[in-house]
Image: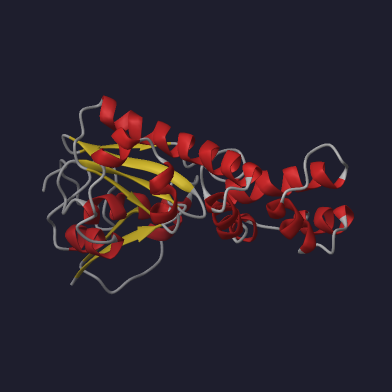
Amino acid sequence: MHAGIGLAGLGRRGAEAALKAIPHPFASVTFISDGLAACLGAHSGADGAIVVAGTGSVGIGLCEGREIRVAGYGFPVSDEGSGADIGLQVVRLALRAADGRAELTPLLSEVLGAFDHDPYQAVAWSEEARATDYAALAPIVMRHAGQGDPIGRRIVERAADAIGDLLDVFLARGLSRISLVGGLADSITPWLTPDLRACLRPPDADAAAGALLVARGRFKPSRLQTSDDQTSKFRV
C-alpha cells in the first residue's frame, strides 16, 4: 500500500526531513503540502489553480505540471484577505474607536463588547491570541458588512482586493481552471469584481482526493521525494 499525505507547514525548514525519518509500514510515502493536495483535488490532477480563503490565505497552481505558490507565508506577516487578517483589522479599528479616533459603528461596538468595552482586556487577549482566534471574528465582520456597516464594508472590500490579487496572478499565467476554496470562499465571492467571479469554477473534489492521486501514482512531484527515494517528473 502506497500513501500520499498532504500536510500544512511542510515547507518549514526541516519538516519534510523529520517526517521522512519516521518509520512507517507503507511501500512508499509521498508528502506534499496541503495546498498542493487541495489543488490536485480541485482539478482532478489537471493544470489549474486554487486560492484558499480561510483562516489563512494562499494561492497554489499547477502550470504544465509545475507548482506555483503565491503568498501564504503565515499570519500576521502574510495571509492577506484571510479570516485571521480580517479579525486583526477589526480589532485594530475597534481600539481606535475606543480612543475616539474612529466612528463607533455597530460592528466595532460588538467587537469591543466581546472585551467588555475595555481596550486593555483586548490587548491582554491579543498577547495570547492565535490566527484561529482572530479568524473567529471574521463572520461577525462579514455579517455587519452585509448589513451595510461602513467599517465592515471597508474591511471586507480590502480582503476581497487581496484575494483578487492572488486570482490575478494565475489568470496572468493563462490558467483557466481556478477555484476559490476555504471557509470564507462563499462569503467573500460576492465581494469580488464581476470579471473575477466569472472566472471561478467549483472544485471537482477536496484535498483528500488530491492526496489519493499521489498515493495512486497518478501524480508524482519531481521536487518532493517519496520516503523510498522514488522520484519522477510531474505527470498526471
Give the image location of residue 163, x and y in percent. 43, 39
Can the viewer see residue 20?
yes
Question: Which of 84 and 32 lies nearest the eye of the viewer?
Answer: 84
Say which residue appears at 24% left-offset and 53% top-offset. 202
Is 146 displayed left or right of 222 in the figure? right
Residue pushed farthest top?
A: 172
Say which residue appears at 79% left-offset and 38% top-offset. 102
Is 213 displayed left or right of 97 in the figure? left
Can the viewer see residue 80?
no
Question: Which of 80 and 19 lies nearest the eye of the viewer?
Answer: 80
Q: On the image, which quarter does residue 126 sit in?
A: bottom right
Give the image location of residue 204, x and y in percent. 19, 57
Q: On the image, which quarter does residue 175 sit in?
A: top left
Say which residue appears at 39% left-offset and 55% top-offset. 186
Is 1 displayed left or right of 24 in the figure? left
Say which residue appears at 56% left-offset and 57% top-offset. 143
Q: Quadrant of the N terminus?
A: bottom left
Give the image location of residue 199, x and y in percent. 24, 39
The mark total stands at: 0
How is the structure coloured here? secondary structure
Give the image location of residue 207, x and y in percent. 30, 60
Is 35 displayed left or right of 143 in the figure? left
